[in-house]
Image (spheres, rainbow, N blue to C red):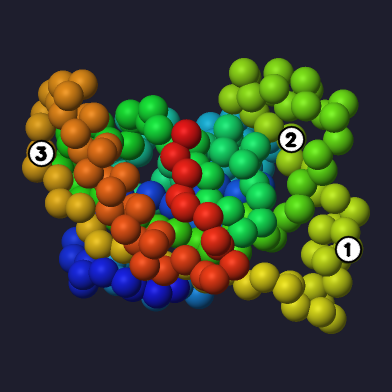
Amino acid sequence: MEYQGLELDGKNIFLFHPHGAFSIANMIHVGTSVTDWKHRPIKGTILNKLFWFPFAKEIFDAMNLVPSNYQIMKSVLEEGNSLTICLGGVKEILFTEPNTMKLSIKNKRGAFRLALETGTPLVPVISYGENELFELSKQSWLEPVQQLLIQCGLYMPIPTIKSCKSWFAIPWVPLDSPIRTVIGNPLKVVQIEDPSEDDIIELREKYFKGLNDLYNETKPKSYAGDLKIV
């Protein structure tokens, strides 16, 4: 993990990009002790529906992960914890393509409202290599199934055979594309207990500018294209 911006102090909301197929970078950085965060404790968010599975709560609790429920996330911040959010969510899995950064965040509101209501700085985080971890199957017959699942807030990532072989061979052969995570400058947020729509949009646009600057300053040579926000 690389700190590209100012020294971080106190609690923050770290917005991770991209989501990728399984949001591996977010879970590793939050759910393990391999990352030297400047501010502990820190909690990560994970899809609500994943808590429905047997023993999921016990596993996610051990990994410092909480459900992506607005009130729970707000409580995490009010208790003095930092929080990580994969802003693109499930829909962004559709854009998991190697050496590209296409983010489904144009109309996101919740994270920015949360930051305003709690006065918590927003910090952009980009993980290069996340999209390269899993090559997803693009079979035409899968498309209508995936679109139906997305309407229900779900997605079924199906890796290609090549991708599965790479992961099963990890004990002997390292992955071709390691993850490089960079953390940008915190965007200071003035607390507004009841933010208006204009307040949310203004903060979101400021954040997008900082995110785009971080991408342009840190993107690998293999990422030839611009950051795309849709």
Q: Residue type at mark 2?
A: Met
Mark 3: few, some, or many residues within 10 Å (few <14, many ≥20)? some
Q: Residue at x 20, y 53 (%)?
A: 187
Mark 1: few, some, or many residues within 10 Å (few <14, many ≥20)? few
Mark 2: few, some, or many residues within 10 Å (few <14, many ≥20)? few
Q: Nearer the viewer, mark 1 or mark 3?
A: 1
Q: Do residues under tags 2 and 1 come within 8 Å of each other at their CB atoms? A: no
Q: Residue at x 41, y 69 (%)?
A: 218
Q: Residue type at mark 3?
A: Gln
Instruction: List x then y, in percent, for residue 79.
Output: 24, 47
- Res 50 quadrant in image: top right
Q: Which residue is mark 3?
A: 191
Q: Residue at x 16, y 29 (%)?
A: 199
Residue 165, labelled with which disc? 1
Give the vertical position of 226 relative to 169 (above or below). Answer: above
Q: Residue at x 65, y 37 (%)?
A: 94
Between discs 2 and 3, the one toward the N terminus: 2
Instruction: Report the side of 105 relative to 48 (left or right).
Output: left
